[in-house]
């Protein structure tokens, strides 16, 4: 079983649209993991049945019991996150600032502070309309620890793929290069970088590839909206060749991307011409590269 | 006054709007643009200004002093993030997991885990005439954006008066980095596109802002593609739609080269003027 991760650095480059097309083409041979748990959109195209549901607990939040609190202020003094303050003569925790480190609870002389485990989201194992299994999640609003939820989604997808003898796990990653992205990269066999033809696309590609390099994972790249700025597309291609990143394909700026999405379809279902042919060829290439 | 530009979905036009608004407003008054998307900061690509100051940003993590350690194991017990682990006769510290709470360091009975600073990124401060630009970028491999976002805002608060209009280009998503970037803002502009992905992620972003009890409005970018779901939703929920930027390949082309759009695109400029009027009204307490 091979694990293929699709990331972009920059948001909105077409990552999910391309991943969904690969999922459609892979059909019963694959398991999808939607690891963009912050703003997961894959379900909008895959129509999952929200099968097996599990709560996801992660992290803690401090809580002060005012009956026990003597207002000594020791907790506020040691809190490095500015999460404890005196309001109307009583100490209270600012939930948004609390990191859940538990330091305050440990030093409180009257044991007035307790830590509560937080339910931060839900994960689902679903069947999709295209035939593959999909593991996805919904992170609670403003929740921390999306990296851990990413790890959970991915590990479940890998377990299912192994148990059911699937050839590939396709991981739709999140934008940026922080903890959720690091989590989605760990253990991957191949990375598909989706960029766009703009100076921002190139800038973000370079940064996210620095991260991929640290993991020593082989990578390929799709340049989306490549005709928007042919000069930048050439610059991107030059970067790919310098870094030994396989240049999978150039896709055009095409409103069929949006039209397919508005129809709840993948591009390969909506478009029967060039886009479909290019994406089909790209998927075959990505599989070949992941198996090398 | 602080205006944050955010969105659930990435790539909806946060940076385009932030840099164009900053330039547009700076034609009349002093403006501070702050790029808080520290993982992938892009605003700087659109700004031509002089570097005034730069500084490294650090976070703190413990280092193990073997000679002082009695291997009592308390440090491992108190760390909620598994950043300090006792393995046989040694203590391993994983700085990338450390949240810098100081519990292990300060509770260690023999002071065997003093805190040390580790560079996590860099802040740069630029200026050209009325436009001041601050950006921070996270070092690659650093996983936590929140401490750098927090320190960047602190820098801005310490160096500039409260009254100056500040625009915060925020990271995408709805989790901790977005909360950190928006929680101190007076008003949040959510940029979306009228597509199923845009609409879905906008609803998440709205829920986040409601949780934070923030005033917010919506700017629809690439107006004309997709469908009317976003517009109908905003109407039904009485959410102000501050501007509608048309779907136009020419805008995408200008953006792709790092150009400021409004001087070259009258409709874009008109929409920017609507946003400006909205902000000025908000600043004068005119929204109800």
Image (spheres, helix red, strand yellow):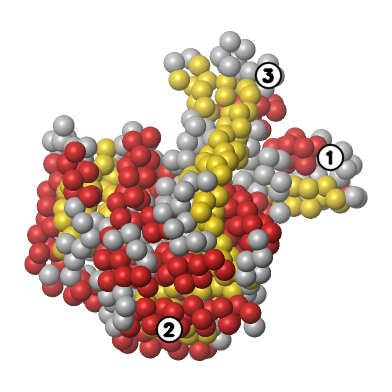
Can you identify the residue that label 2 sits on? A249
Q: How many numbered marks have been drawn onto this rendered protein structure?
A: 3
In screen coordinates, is A155 left or right of A140? right
Nearer-the-camera pick, A154 or A166: A166
**Which SS class for mark 1?**
loop
- Quadrant location of the N terminus of chain A in the rendered image: bottom right
Asked if residue A140 can be seen in this view, the reply is yes
**Which SS class for mark 2?**
strand
In screen coordinates, is A35 left or right of A15? right
- Quadrant location of the C terminus of chain A in the rendered image: bottom right
Nearer-the-camera pick, B248 or A122: A122
Asked if residue B257 can be seen in this view, the reply is no
Can you identify the residue that label 3 sits on? A111
Q: Marks 3 and 2, how far apart in space?
A: 61 Å
In contact (CB < 8 Å): disc 1 and disc 3? no
The chain that hosts pointer 3 is A
In screen coordinates, is A249 left or right of B228? right
In contact (CB < 8 Å): disc 3 and disc 2? no
Nearer-the-camera pick, B157 or B212: B212
Q: In this rendering, which labeled residue sits more in front, label 2 or label 1?
A: 2
Can you identify the residue that label 1 sits on? B73
Residue A209 to residue B216: above or below: below
Q: Marks 1 and 3, how far apart in space?
A: 22 Å
Residue B81 to residue A241: above or below: above
Which residue is painted at 63% across and 45% down in the image? Answer: B100
Which residue is painted at 71% across and 46% down in the image? Answer: B82
The chain that hosts pointer 1 is B
User: Callout 3 environment at 10 Å: few (<14), some (14 to 19), or many (20+)?
Assistant: some
Residue B107 to residue B100: above or below: above
User: Callout 2 environment at 10 Å: few (<14), some (14 to 19), or many (20+)?
Assistant: some
Which residue is painted at 63% across and 28% down in the image? Answer: A115
Q: Residue B133 is drawn in which quadrant?
A: bottom left
């Amino acid at each position: 079983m091979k694990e293929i991760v699709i990331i972009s650095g920059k948001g909105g480059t077409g990552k999910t649209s391309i991943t969904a097309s690969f999922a459609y083409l892979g059909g019963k041979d694959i398991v999808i993991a939607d690891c963009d748990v912050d703003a997961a959109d894959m379900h909008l195209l895959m129509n999952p049945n929200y099968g097996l549901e599990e709560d996801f607990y992660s992290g803690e939040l401090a809580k002060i019991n005012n009956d026990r609190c003597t207002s000594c202020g020791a907790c506020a003094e040691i809190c490095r996150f500015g999460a404890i303050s005196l309001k109307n003569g009583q100490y209270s925790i600012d939930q948004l600032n609390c990191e859940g480190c538990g330091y305050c609870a440990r030093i409180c002389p009257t044991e007035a502070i307790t830590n509560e485990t937080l339910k931060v989201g839900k994960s689902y194992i679903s069947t999709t309309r295209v035939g593959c299994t999909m593991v996805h999640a919904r992170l609670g609003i403003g929740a921390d620890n999306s990296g851990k939820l990413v790890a959970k989604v991915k590990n479940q997808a890998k377990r299912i793929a192994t148990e059911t003898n699937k050839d590939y796990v396709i991981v739709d990653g999140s934008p940026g290069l922080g903890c959720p992205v690091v989590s989605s990269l760990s253990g991957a066999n191949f990375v598909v970088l989706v960029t766009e033809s703009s100076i921002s696309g190139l800038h973000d590609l370079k940064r996210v590839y620095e991260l991929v390099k640290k993991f020593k994972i082989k990578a390929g790249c799709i340049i989306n909206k490549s005709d928007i700025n042919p000069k930048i597309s050439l610059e991107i291609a030059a970067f790919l060749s310098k870094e030994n990143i396989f240049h999978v394909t150039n896709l055009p700026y095409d409103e069929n991307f949006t039209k397919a999405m508005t129809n709840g379809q993948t591009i390969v279902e909506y478009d029967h011409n060039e886009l479909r042919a290019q994406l089909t060829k790209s998927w075959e290439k990505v599989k070949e590269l992941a198996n090398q | 006054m602080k205006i944050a530009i955010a969105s659930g979905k990435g790539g909806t036009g946060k940076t385009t709007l932030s840099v164009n608004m900053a330039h547009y407003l700076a034609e009349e008054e002093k403006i501070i643009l702050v790029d808080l998307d520290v993982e992938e900061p892009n605003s700087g690509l659109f700004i031509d200004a002089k570097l005034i100051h730069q500084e490294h940003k650090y976070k703190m993590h413990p280092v193990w002093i073997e000679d002082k350690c009695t291997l009592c194991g308390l440090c491992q017990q108190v760390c909620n993030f598994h950043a300090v682990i006792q393995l046989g006769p040694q203590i391993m510290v994983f700085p990338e997991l450390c949240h810098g709470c100081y519990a292990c360091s300060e509770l260690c009975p023999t002071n065997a885990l003093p805190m040390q600073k580790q560079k996590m990124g860099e802040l740069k401060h630029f200026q050209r005439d009325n436009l001041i630009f601050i950006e921070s970028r996270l070092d690659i491999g650093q996983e936590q954006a929140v401490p750098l976002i927090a320190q960047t805002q602190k820098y801005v608060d310490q160096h500039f008066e409260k009254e100056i209009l500040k625009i915060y280009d925020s990271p995408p998503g709805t989790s901790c980095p977005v909360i950190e970037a928006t929680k101190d803002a007076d008003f949040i502009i959510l940029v979306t596109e009228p597509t199923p992905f845009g609409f879905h992620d906008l609803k998440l972003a709205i829920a986040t802002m409601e949780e934070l009890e923030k005033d917010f409005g919506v700017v629809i970018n690439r107006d004309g593609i997709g469908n009317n779901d976003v517009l109908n939703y905003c109407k039904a929920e009485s959410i102000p739609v501050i501007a509608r930027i048309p779907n136009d390949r020419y805008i995408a082309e200008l953006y792709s080269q790092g150009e400021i759009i409004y001087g070259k695109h009258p409709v874009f400029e008109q929409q920017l003027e609507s946003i400006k009027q909205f902000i000025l009204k908000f600043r004068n307490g005119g929204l109800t």
